Every structure is written in structure tokens, then in C-alpha cells.
Amino acid sequence: ALPICEDQFDVTVNLRFGRREVFAQDTWRIRPNLTLDYGVRYQYFVPVTDENNVLTSFDPLLFDPADIPQCTTAACATLVRGTGNELNGIAVAGSTSRFGRAINASDKNNFSPRVGIAWDPWKNGNTVIRAGYGLYYDQVLVGIFEQNAFVNPPFNNRATFSGAGVGFSNPSGGALGALPVRDLIATSHDFRTPEVQQWSFGIQRQILRNMVGELSYVGTKGDFLIRPVDINYPDPDDVNRVTLTNANTVRPFLGYRRIQYRETSAKSRYHGMLSSVS
């Protein structure tokens, strides 16, 4: 049977967010043939909140294995209402969230220095050596935080049902009035501000009267980049042991299906050699 997926409500958000920045820079001509540019930027990205506190997330530190609702069947296709905690592990802004009206901690350490050097070693203008470095932070899309509210309880419920017996006459394939095993979208509780470092080192040389050659090494290093991870994906060995239709019985966080966890654990690295003649 084809899976059936349905949202319970159309949630509306009224977001509040912002940024605070300050920047200082200077240029120092150390010698006639040596110039230093330097500066620093500080950025504070105000955590996203909602006027009506409808922001939610799943926080593993709030999940209690002893408070899982009971399953209605051996395959755990649905849950028995009124058993356990139906919001087990759910962080609600202004209520159960560990971050007050936000669902992630504020990051107040976003200092980004920049420095650049230009040096004419032979003082004749024919050759210039340049080097630079900068650290940059990214204010992430607010959708990373608001989209949770469109899916998660208690403001919405999204459930996917599949398997034998599922149809329009009986969407859950189980007991009427049972609690669905829900899908969640969550933001990592230790969400960091994504950052990128860039650096370069190059030599420019006048080859002919109207020709300049350049050779440079450039590098980029990204850390704390965003990626979605299903933190409730069952171990394949466990699935093979109980069969695929019983996957809900062996998930890390029982009582839920897929938990799309947006975390800042991705990295990127780039190194390149650039050359040009003009």
C-alpha cells in the first residue's frame, strides 16, 4: 500500500529575530613598500522567537525512555493515547525549551578578524607579494527554526502510515483514535553559527611592459555547516532482526518515526592554485 501523510493544522508563525554588528578596520603603511590592512567584525544573531511561542524542536536531553507511550500493536504502527508522555522529548518555546522563548542557545562569540599584507620586496613596483586571511559567520535562514512548528506537536501533528490495511477508509491501519507514530523536524540543541575561513598567498609580477603574471594559493575552510540527519534511523542489524514492518520498535527514540535533525556538524575544505596572465 502507498504511504499516506497528512498534516493536522495549518500553523501560522509571527517571528522575531535580528542581528547586531560592529566593525573596525585600519590601514598601516609600515614601510614605503609594506602595507598592512587589518580589522575585526563582531556579529550577534538574535535567536529566533515567535510572538505566540509556537516554535518547537526535539531535544534528546528532554527524552525519557521511561515515559514512552505504549504501542497498540506488535509492529508499533500507532500508540495508545493517554499512556506515557505524548510530547516526550519535545521542546516548546516558553515552556519546556531549555532556551526560554527560543529553541536554540544564543552564540555570543562571533568575532571575525581580517588581515591583509601587500609587500614590494625590491621596491621597484615590478613584483608584489600579497597575503590575506578572513573569518566570516553566516546568519542562517530562519526557516531552520520556523519549519519545525509546521510539523511538530503540540501545534501540529504529521504522521505517515503505510503497510497492509492502510487506506482511505482506515488511514492509520490500526485502532481508531490511536496516537500516530509521528515524524518530527528538529533543530540541534547545540546549534552553532556556521563559519568560513578564507586565506590566500600570491605573487604578482610584471613580465612585459603591458603584461602581468600572477600565481596564487587560496584556501577555504568551512565549519559548523548545516546538514539534516535522521537521528531516529534504526540500526540495520536491529531491523533485520525484527523485519522492516517493525522498524518503529527498534528506533533510538521510541514513539517517533523519522526525526530530521538540523545540526551544524558538516565541514568543507578547499585548496587551490590559481594562475593568470593579463
Image (cartoon, rainbow, N blue to C red):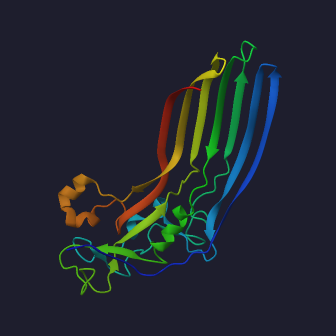
Picture layout, residue 27 above or below residue 205:
below
The spot of residue 37 in percent (x, y) is 75, 32
Asked if residue 176 can be seen in this view, the reply is yes
Q: Is residue 260 left or right of residue 4?
A: right
Identify the image quadrant of the N terminus: bottom left
Picture layout, residue 267 above or below residue 250:
above
Residue at the extreme front: 210
What residue do we see at 28% from left, 61% from top? Answer: 250
Q: Is residue 184 left or right of residue 246?
A: right
What residue do we see at 50% from left, 31% from top? Answer: 271
The spot of residue 87 in percent (x, y) is 45, 73
Which quarter of the figure has residue 278?
Answer: top right
The spot of residue 79 in percent (x, y) is 32, 76
Q: Is residue 14 left or right of residue 25?
A: left
Asked if residue 101 can be seen in this view, the reply is no
Q: How many marks?
A: 0
The spot of residue 96 in percent (x, y) is 55, 69
Front residue of 98 and 154: 154
Front residue of 125 and 83: 125
Picture layout, residue 124 above or below residue 30:
above
What residue do we see at 60% from left, 50% from top? Answer: 138
Q: Is residue 176 left or right of residue 208?
A: left
Front residue of 38 and 274: 274
Residue at the extreme top: 122
Picture layout, residue 264 above or below residue 3:
above
What residue do we see at 21% from left, 67% from top? Answer: 245
